[in-house]
Image (cartoon, helix red, strand yellow):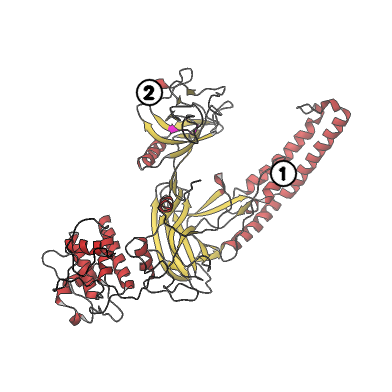
Amino acid sequence: MTSAPLEESYLLPSPATFVKDETGNTYHYVYNPAGTEAIKSELMAGRAVSICFHADQSQPGYLSEDVYINPETWAQYTYTSDLEGEKSAVANHAVTIVGWDDNYAVSNFTADNPLPPGPGAWIVKNSWGAADQEFPNHGEWGVNGYFYLSYYDHTILSPESLNFYTDLMRNAQAGMKQELGVAKYDYLPTFGDLVRYVHLDKPASMANVFHIEESDGPVSLRTLSFQTETPNTTVTFEVYLLRDGYTTPLDGELVCTQTKSYPYGGYHQIELVDRPIFPVGASFSIVVTCQGAGGQYELANERYLSKLMADIAGEQGASISYGVGVINPGESFMSFTGADGTARWADWSAVVDQATENSLAALDQAGLSEARRQAAEANQALETAYAAYLEAHPEAADSQELPEELLPYLAAYQQTGQAVNDILDAVTSGALDGFALYASDNFPVAATLERVTFTDLGLEQGGTPHWAVRAVDMAKRLGLMAGESDTLFVPDAPVTRAMAAQVLYNLAGQPEGEGASFPDVAADAWYAPAVAWGARTGVIQGYDNGDFGPEDPVTREQLASLIYRYEQSQGGGFSGEWAYRLPFSDLEALSDWAMEAASWCNMRGVMTGKTGGRFDPAGTATRGELATILTRYHQSMAEGEAK
């Protein structure tokens, strides 16, 4: 089987909406053009849109009593829904919208039924398809599985676009191994409206705390994810490396922050470029603040029906599954703003425990226990009376109808059951009430982690992470630098001229082409193509004697010149007259030929100097320094392209 992680989903508005009439008792259909435009925008972005609708066939070749599809043109228009009457259609099938035709004529639809009020139809893929096509196609249906669905169909429900992260599949096919883990607590199954959102006027946030075990790490933080309810919600992520003995999710060092607004509610994931690194034994928090377009703050609570709800349903003749939420102390936190304007953090497990206790008290005060007792007695009375009736009338055992003399018992049972439902409806209408009826889980704040394979970066239990660890991780992921082996990066080793040529060649995308050769560069050397490219572009220069010196160490001022010449080869660098004051204390040691390069690199934040305010121009550049300078330059290029 093939699987891929969900990267993002958008919960789109539906073209089919319903409003209550003046009496407030019945609904009538209203076409929502914003839903149509939203679906089109996702299709134009390259994402298909999943919908539910009423299919009048349970399988290919079988038509229902009400035929809404024209089998000649494969055009469907369902002109009524379950909200509009007793014989109305209910959404019962999931399909995928892949395109549209604004000019699709109404004459294509079934003439025996009411026609759509205007032209236009979605081009929709159904999994039924044709028998001669590969799985899941299995029937002679539609145009190779496609059909037309009117823009004005009354049963279009829950449009959602989904985007999946497919690099993992491509990497696996290419033989590349990625060790990914998930930092996530909310594995409690949820469906429908059981993700509950509470909207608050004052600032509020959610946080999950995770711990890196020896079997997990060390790791880099690859993505951050959350789910929102309302359109145009702004989500702010903050990641903290927590200190030992933390008491709140802010009790540590802020190592990452990201903010983004989303046009629709749904599941959202941000992929990080400059990733925080967490050593073995570290604890970190992910703090999420969601603010809707109207200024309100959103708290999301994933939940499932509790055992109490399953028991109540069982007493009334229904059978439902239930969940058990496990929230351990110290895993999840919520912040709220008090009357004095001060933000306070509370352990979510304690909040849920207290809310559940309050909910049980509210249910008891509302008379739920007594209502359940009366319902149980009424049910027992009905069963006893029915058993006695069958004993006296054994011929009625196969009858599907309840004898008339037992109807009062049934009415009493239904009345007590309705009393139970009325209490449940009343209690669950509050913001925190009803917690006893649902099993709550941790907040849906999650992340994916990628294992750091280098073992010489100080990321072991109790180790001190190397100062360049984030840059080393990024340089490897971007394909700019490799380790000395699969497990060793050797960050403090000197940079050689061959290394410098290779990383700049990697930065350029390894273009092909002939270039000048040096007598001390073997044609089959691993760095030969990079040196040839560098000589051809002027980025790499040899010595006066004609040699290249591949194993010679590179000084920091030489590295600045290499970066600057690469920038010039891309059309950048200073032009015309320029002036820049370098802020270093050892400028007298900087060679005149390196002044322009060092000035540009410092101005762009590529080279910021060393401890004590020194540039250390003659110092040998290390692999850790090269990774840092290179990734800073890469980010500078990306920011320039964005502008």
| Residue 524 drawn at (x, y percent) | 27, 63
* Image position, residue 11 (x, y; %): 46, 44
Residue at x 81%, y 37% (from the top left corner): 383
Task: Depth check: give the residue in front, 608 or 365.
Answer: 608
Q: Is residue 484 visible?
A: yes
Q: Are marks 1 and 2 in contact (CB under 8 Å)?
A: no
Q: Is residue 488 left or right of residue 502?
A: right
**Residue 510 quadrant:** bottom left
151 relative to 621 in the view: left or right: right
From this view, report whether residue 301 is shown above or below residue 242: above
Q: Amino acid at mark 2?
A: Ala
- Residue 343 screen position, x and y as percent: 49, 65
- Residue at the disc numbered 2: 105
Q: Is residue 273 left or right of residue 416?
A: left
Dividing the picture into quadrants, the one containing residue 57 is: top right
Distance between mark 1 and mark 2 Cα atoms: 51 Å
* Residue 314, numbered label: 1
* Amino acid carrying mark 1 in the image: Gly
Q: Secondary structure at mark 1?
A: helix
Q: Residue at x 59, y 65 (%)?
A: 329
The local crowd at label 1, few if under 14, some if 14 to 19, many if 20 or more residues have their Cα within 10 Å, is few
Q: Position of residue 65 (x, y in %)?
A: 57, 22
Which disc, if any, is residue 375?
none
Q: Farthest top residue?
A: 112
Residue 565 is a magenta residue: no
Q: Nearer the viewer, residue 557 or 65?
A: 557
Which residues are drawn in magenta? 124-129
Question: Quick one: label 1 or label 2, which is nearer the N terminus?
Answer: 2
Question: In terms of secondary structure, where does tag 2 sit?
Answer: loop
Secondary structure, magenta segment, majority class: loop
